[in-house]
Image (tube, rainbow, N blue to C red):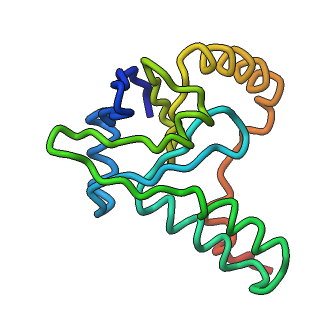
Amino acid sequence: MSSAINKIDSKGRISIPAPFRSVLEFQGYPGVYLFPSFTSKAVDGGGQDLIDQISLSVEKMQLFAEETDALSTALFADTYSLSYDQDGRISLPEILIEHANLSEKVIFVGQGRKFQMWNPDDFNEFKREAKIKALENRNLIGPSPVGKENKKVDD
């Protein structure tokens, strides 16, 4: 959750915000997984839980289907496993910097199981549009189906 802006240096190094790092480290991996977002000009990031969830989703698909190979390649070929240096920084690969149009500052945006890294100007535009879409689709928010499959109906 939350958001934070950090500077990116001329070598492409940036510090992952401490609250984000603590969640990632709690998952048992002293680093971060990053990949280009499929849906926006952002970098998606997360920890071991996110990678495990993605892997399980792909494993549920047909093993030798073209769609499985395409999705697996798209998901994993450009995923980077990055460790922190002694100052909590990572070095961003150029492909991620270019994909998200990152330069001097980066905004980290929490999204539950993952976070995104954005150019702040691009994020402000995205956020305005997202608020409109969220308002239009607020009726989709409802009670959670968790636990319903385990309820027994008496006849």
Residue 153 is left or right of residue 76, and the answer is right
Q: Residue furthest bottom?
A: 64
**Horizontal placement of 113 versus 65: left or right?**
left
Which residue occupies 53% across, 57% down?
79
Q: Residue at x 50, y 33 (%)?
A: 117
Q: Position of residue 68 (x, y in %)?
A: 77, 74
- The x and y percentages for residue 104 are 43, 18
Above or below residue 134? Residue 64 is below
Q: What count of labels does the image hold?
A: 0
Name the image quarter holding the N terminus.
Answer: top left
- Answer above or below: position of 73 versus 82: below
Relative to residue 23, is residue 55 drawn left or right? right
Residue 38, horizontal then vertical, whole percent: 71, 46
Left or right of residue 63: residue 21: left
In percent of width and height, residue 102 lies at 52, 26
**Residue 70 image-quadrant placement:** bottom right
Residue 126 falls in image quadrant: top right
Taking the view exactly as shown, the residue that stands out farthest to the left is: 86
Q: Residue at x 17, y 38 (%)?
A: 87
Residue at position x 81%, y 30% in the image: 137
Q: Quadrant of the C terminus?
A: bottom right
Where is 103 relative to 155, above or below? Answer: above
